[in-house]
Amino acid sequence: MAQKGKGMQHKNVSEKLAALFSMHIGNNIVPTLEEPAIRFFSTDNRVMDKDEIRDISHEFLALMVAVIGSSDPFNKGSAEYHALETFFATLSHKILMRGGNIEDIVRYTQTLQHTFSDALEKDSGVEFSKSRSVLLFFTEIFNEIIMAIFRSYLEEKERALHAQEAEL
């Protein structure tokens, strides 16, 4: 019975999200999505320029739309979900290679989560922030993204250690 209820809950969330994105929400929120990236990557440590920030904001939005619009947005094994995780792992690697730090990447991702939710709500006029199921869905996605960021960080640290060992 619990499984059936969970499946029904997933269907309700999927329908809410599909309805939201069927309204063609999104294109107007890219400038809002750029703000956290500018704050964390372009002001103090300047690891990204404004064109790169615009590009990653567009790509993030396209990937989120793909996840939400997929046949099963809750499937962490889907190609869409994998693409989103890969995007953040690659972004993390790029920022770390340019002298950024893991803390800023995680803070950016957390801020992006809130910015994304707020921007969708404002752009759509749909008060989905009052829908616990939709908020939990976004929280689950962003938790997985943060884990992908940390996996990328740990892999980079391991590569650096192996390179140091090889030099000795």
Image (cartoon, helix red, strand yellow):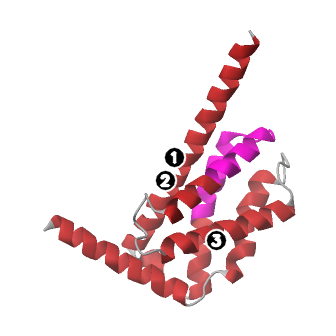
Picture disc at residue 130: none
Q: Residue 73 falls in which quadrant of the image? A: bottom left
List the residue tagged with mark 3: 61
Instruction: Please give the residue where the numbered disc 2 appears in the rendered image.
Output: 143
Residue lying at the far left of the rendered structure: 1
Q: Can residue 42 be seen in this view?
A: yes
Q: What residue type is labelled 3?
A: Leu
The stretch drawn in magenta includes residue 7:
no
Q: What element carries label 3?
A: helix
Looking at this rendering, what residue extends furthest in the bottom direction?
A: 23
Residue at 60% x, 82% y is: 122
Residue labelled with disc 1: 147
In the image: residue 149, left or right of residue 73 = right
Check contact, mark 2 vs mark 3: CB within 8 A: no
- For the magenta stretch, what is the residue range? 88-113
In the displayed structure, 139 sits above or below 158; it is below
C-alpha separation, residue under disc 3 versus residue under disc 1 = 19 Å
Evaluate if marks 2 and 1 touch, with contact meaning CB atoms under 8 Å apart: yes
* Magenta stretch encompasses residue 101: yes
In the rendered image, residue 135, in percent from the top left (x then y), is placed at 44, 69
